[in-house]
Amino acid sequence: MAITDIKAFAHLTAADIEALGRELDTVRRDVEVSLGERDAKYIRYTIAAQRILEASGRATLFASKKRWAWLTGTALLSVAKIIENMELGHNISHGQWDWMNDPEIHSTTWEWDMTGTSAQWKAAHNYSHHMYTNILDMDDDLGFGILRMTRDEEWKPINLAQPFANLVLAALFEWGIAIHDLAAIKEQMGVSPKELFSEPNKAFWRKAGKQVAKDFVIYPALTGPAWKSTLKANATANLIRNLWAYAVIFCGHFPDGAQKFTVEQFENETPGEWYLRQMLGSANFQAGPVMAFMSGNLSFQIEHHLFPDIPSNRYAEVSVKVRELCDKYDLPYTTGSLGKQYLLAFRTIHKLALPDRFLRRTSDDAPETSSERKFAGITLPSLPSLQNNEWLQNNEWLAEHHLNGVDPVTGQRRGLRSALQEAKVALKEKAQHEKAVLREAKVALQEKARQEKALLQAKAGRERRSSRILRRKR
């Protein structure tokens, strides 16, 4: 199963985790008290830049029959749509700029340039996903209802189509998110899927209709003779925005190291454990200032999950403190290049399309998902019952297994990062030992086969000699 006991998995005591939570609370407070004009200028300049880019792109598309104009206009429009989606729509709807009390830049009033409504997205994403991040059967964003992203989910024949479904989702990401959010809000409201004229359906189709009309009817028509090339440019810009948003989201949620959790872990979760779950359930990707900006600063997905309503322009400085805390508590800070993180997610998508009988690992020790049982027999050879936390009160046992937070030899804190490194070495040594045992067994079998062959040959020789003697006697 996925993680049922985050303390055991993280190799931290309850006191360690609560201390970590208090330090992260301090990080939040430090940012909140320092918010001011610099941050307000950032978001206002971003809005102005996005609108200039969009207006320039749409103006250029009036000449879109010419190749240079089509390429330039499409590029400008693509960048404008990406900024609006990632840095503006997503982050403003998270309430990151509500502290300004600006009615035009507020989570209650901003409507983004996407198919789905901001209200439905906020209900499905801000609450369900960020409250229940990566909890099985509670976080609907875990595979978006169409992809199997953990071995804890039962395999179904429909999963064989997962590689194709992934391509469709990437190309039509705004529609996939909109439909996903619509289903989530209807479930929250208790609205039957068969009720075609429900309020959620009406809101969805009103917004979707406006988006389709804007991009594929009104703006193309405004360019007159160039309407056909403008239509293609708008469709291309939407496709580019969809692919980029999809890549950013998948790189932050589904690479190896982004852990999954069970309802059992959530039921008695403390504030410190909530913070820890966000840290272990998310992943970053390496980005410079431009790529970070174009990703809505979701290259800092770990920081975003820790502080979803902190202004995104602060995530870079927050990440320094989060890394320091990871070092202090010996926790992994999951990150890598954009290409690497996506390839890991891509591998999981295709691997989990197959039935479990074709998979070598289990949901306890797979690269894309694991649990505290991963360490049984490796770093925790005598792990007491995982069904309760009585063992966490046993100081002697904690000290013996370095779970008291400090290595008795080096004086350094020991946590999940060290445990993962030890497990990797132990598994490698185990594999080498098993390989050596197999080699020895193979040699023994070969020697036994040679001996048996020699015995058979000797027996056959004796029988031939006996046969010749009998023939002579006759």
Image (spheres, helix red, strand yellow):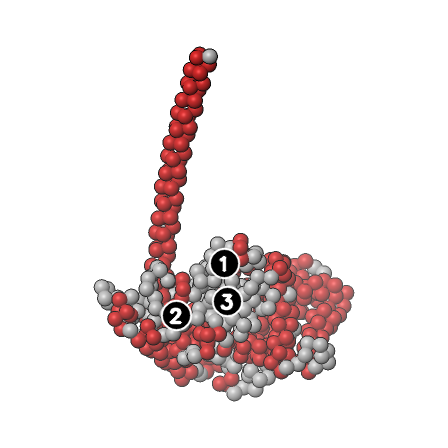
- Farthest residue to the right: give it: 225
- Farthest residue to the front: give it: 474
Left or right: residue 370 compared with residue 118: left
The residue at which mark 1 appears reads as 344
Residue type highlighted by circle 1: Leu
Mark 1 element type: helix
For image coordinates 40% across by 64% down, the residue present is: 373
Say which label, 3 or 2, has the lower sequence index.
Answer: 3
Say which label, 3 or 1, has the lower sequence index.
Answer: 3
Report the Cα–Cα distance between label 3 and label 1. Answer: 11 Å
* Label pair 3/2, CB-CB below 8 angstroms: no
Nearer the observer: mark 3 or 2; the answer is: 2
For image coordinates 53% across by 79% down, the residue present is: 127
Residue type highlighted by circle 2: Leu
Say which label, 1 or 2, has the lower sequence index.
Answer: 1
The front one of 54 and 31 is: 31
Nearer the observer: mark 1 or 2; the answer is: 2
* Label pair 3/1, CB-CB below 8 angstroms: no
The front one of 34 and 365 is: 365
Residue type highlighted by circle 3: His
Report the Cα–Cα distance between label 1 and label 2. Answer: 30 Å
The residue at which mark 2 appears reads as 386
How many C-alpha atoms fall within 10 Å of the one at disc 2: few (<14), some, or many (≥20)? Answer: few
For image coordinates 52% across by 87% down, the residue present is: 101
* Disc sitting over residue 442 in the figure: none
The residue at which mark 3 appears reads as 253
Left or right: residue 209 compared with residue 338: right
How many C-alpha atoms fall within 10 Å of the one at disc 3: few (<14), some, or many (≥20)? Answer: many
The front one of 445 and 209 is: 445
Report the Cα–Cα distance between label 3 and label 2. Answer: 27 Å
Mark 3 element type: helix
The percent position of residue 218, horizontal first and vertical second, equals 73, 72
